[in-house]
Amino acid sequence: MKKLTQADFKERRDRLAEEMGPHSIAVIATSPVAMRNRDADYKFRADSSFFWLTGFAEPEAVAVIETYESIDEGYTYSLFCRERNREMEIWNGYRAGVDGAVDDFEADEAYAIDLLDEEIQEKLQNKAKLFYRIGQQAAFDARVAGWIAKASGESRRGTSAPAQIVQLDRIIDELRLHKTEQELELMQIASDISAEAHTRAMQTVKPGMMEYALEAELNYVFGKNGCVPSYNSIVGGGENACILHYVENDKVLKDGDLVLIDAACEYQLYASDITRTFPVNGKFSPEQKALYNVVLDSQIAAIHAVQIGNSYKEPHNVAVRILVQGLLDLGIMQGNIDEIIEKEAYRQFYMHGTGHWLGMDVHDVGTYKLDGEWRAYEEGMVVTVEPGLYIAPDDETVDVKWRGIGIRIEDDVVATENGPRVLTAAVVKSVEEIEALMAK
């Protein structure tokens, strides 16, 4: 099993400490446990940014990084976590404890999480800046405000509270946006597993099958590889494919319809994101094939536009022009291509963007604009490329033969100095490849 090492997490803390500057403190908490219903919790998943810094996957944990008067002096990394408790571990599983936090997760200091309010006061004293994820958790925001108020009230003792509070996400998000080779290896594994799942779906689908049964085929592949879905899977047959976030997955897959699957897994907390659309009976109709090829042409061109130095928006602009031209050629739209694009009249059939950042979160962190301008692609950025066309079943402006057809094709793409690298290339997407695979 491929995993990041403690050296990888330390290198990340090194980079954060350097960004913080001298005489500063950063405080970052993991996610709270979320209740599913009554006394049943959702399976815990660590907060992405917390895990990115620590590699620590248990709940009820807070990491603290303190820099000294000179950045050359280094920093102290403290981890507050749950103590070992034999009775609780019998019920809920083993804990690292404070000793494991030091021995296994390389914290310089470790404390029981119950001591956080007490110990943090000394750590805040005489720091120039507090770096904190403002607005992530309301309850924790209130707790931090209490710490600052208490530290400020002790100024008569010759100490001071941090004079400046800085949004920590601004720094961590930018660091997370550029993936290392180690991260890309994990994303490639997630992509390969997800591609296997989509391939299985194409090979097992048949008319009369339930959407949730096809979803189960995906989940089987995810689960046997030790993964979980990285988001709620979409398995939309027929007109359900025209609902962008359709997740009920409870209808019958009908002969003659397409099915749109937007589903993927995360591996070691790194996500993949794939969409494929294919015929339930294994054969595209002429109308389905015509629309599908328009989307595919736009997607291939948009992927090629993920070039270092290109604007983030360039793949979208490329995709839109090809989609509009295709709609004009098929007679679904009429008019001048430039006017249609300028007025965004195409949004009747293509109403979303062409991609988003991808990483530990399926909609990953990182700004899309710098100083009000779309930022340029840089080495190691990962973006999805996912154009689509959706002809609503009740759209009376369109010939009935097109209605109820929804198509999206999505791949995960890394910007590299050698051009775009497609992580999800292992699952077929041309009409000929899909029909050949489904005929086996």
Image (cartoon, rainbow, N blue to C red):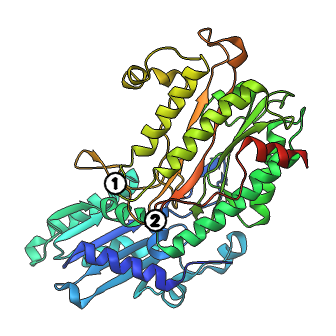
**In the rendered image of this protein, does residue 362 appear above or below residue 181?**
above
Quarter of the image holding residue 176? bottom left
Please indicate whether residue 438 sits to the left or right of residue 392 in the image: right
Given residues 285 and 99, the one toward you in this image is: 285
Q: Quadrant of the N terminus?
A: bottom right
Residue 376 image label: 1
Residue 171, image x and y in percent?
31, 64
Query: Is mark 1 in CB contact (under 8 Å) with mark 2?
Result: no
Please tell me how crowded label 1 is: few (under 14), some (14-19), or many (20+) other residues with Cα within 10 Å: some
x and y percentages locating residue 66 in the rendered image: 28, 79
Q: Residue at x 81, y 46 (%)?
A: 202
Which element is circle 2 on?
loop
Q: Residue at x 84, y 42 (%)?
A: 213
Residue 101 in sight here: no
Left or right placement of residue 320 versus residue 295 in this view: left
Q: Nearer the viewer, residue 124 or 202?
A: 202
Above or below, comparing residue 134 to residue 318 in the picture: below
Q: Is residue 197 visible to us here? A: yes
The residue type indicated by label 1 comes to: Ala
What label does residue 416 carry, if any?
2
Residue 1's label in the rendered image is none
Bin the neighbour count of mark 2 within 10 Å (Cα to Cα): few under 14, some 14-19, many 20 and up: some
The residue sitting at 50% across, 59% down in the picture is: 420
What x and y, as percent, mark residue 282? 85, 38
Where residue 313 appears, as percent x and y from the top left, is 39, 44
* Amino acid type of the residue that numbered disc 2 sits on in the rendered structure: Thr
**Rendering quarter of residue 14:** bottom left
| In the displayed structure image, the side of residue 202 where residue 389 appears, left or right | left
Q: Secondary structure at mark 1?
A: loop
Quadrant of the rendered structure where residue 76 is? bottom left
